């Protein structure tokens, strides 16, 4: 069961000018994401490489089962291991469901 909040801008993920640091717009909340050295709390779509905040992904895009898997990994798993659940942005999720 997916979250009930509709993303504000589901198809946005375009970087700014090439000379500037890469900036993306989160498709769930519409706020800017600066992609640099520090990527904690940021996820990228496995299909189209759109970037989203963790909070936006798990609060607005992911299903309850996906959130539960992530929560189990955080609270019960070994944080030294990499979390390997696939991430799908709202646009790719919609396209997959429509196919």
Image: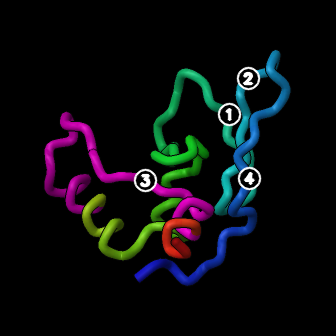
Query: Looking at the image, which residue is at 65% across and 62% down?
Result: 28
Q: SS class of the residue under badge 2?
A: loop
Q: Is residue 33 above or below residue 76?
A: above
Total residue callouts:
4
| Magenta stretch, residue numbers | 71-94
Residue placed under numbered mark 3 in the picture: 87
Pointer 3 and pointer 1: residues touching (CB < 8 Å)?
A: no
Q: Residues within 10 Å of mark 2 (few under 14, many from 20)?
A: few
Q: Which mark is residue 21?
A: 2
Whichever of labels 3 and 4 marks the residue nearer the N terminus, that label is 4
**Residue 89: quadrant of the picture:** bottom right
Alpha carbon of mark 2 to alpha carbon of mark 4: how far? 17 Å
Residue placed under numbered mark 4 in the picture: 12
Q: Give the label, 3 or 1, closer to the camera.
A: 3
Would residue 80 be counted in the magenta stretch? yes
Query: Looking at the image, which residue is at 57% across and 70% down?
Result: 94
Q: Is residue 91 left or right of residue 30?
A: left
Q: Which mark is residue 34?
A: 1
Q: Residues within 10 Å of mark 4 (few under 14, many from 20)?
A: some
Whichever of labels 3 and 1 marks the residue nearer the N terminus, that label is 1
Alpha carbon of mark 2 to alpha carbon of mark 1: how far? 7 Å
Alpha carbon of mark 2 to alpha carbon of mark 3: how far? 23 Å
Whichever of labels 4 and 1 marks the residue nearer the N terminus, that label is 4
Q: Give the label, 2 or 3, closer to the camera.
A: 3
Alpha carbon of mark 4 to alpha carbon of mark 1: how far? 14 Å
x, y percent for residue 38: 52, 27
Would residue 87 be counted in the magenta stretch? yes
Alpha carbon of mark 3 to alpha carbon of mark 4: how far? 16 Å
* Residue closer to the observer: 37 or 89: 89
**Residue 34: quadrant of the picture:** top right
């Amino acid at each position: 069961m997916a979250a009930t909040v509709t993303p504000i801008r589901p198809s946005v993920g375009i970087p700014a000018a090439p000379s500037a640091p890469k900036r993306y717009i989160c498709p769930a909340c519409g706020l800017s994401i600066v992609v640099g050295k520090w990527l904690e709390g940021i996820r990228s779509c496995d299909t189209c490489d759109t970037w989203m905040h963790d909070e936006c992904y798990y609060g607005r895009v992911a299903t309850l089962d996906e959130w539960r898997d992530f929560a189990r990994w955080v609270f019960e798993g070994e944080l030294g291991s990499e979390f390997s659940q696939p991430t799908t942005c709202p646009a790719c999720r919609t396209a997959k469901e429509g196919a």
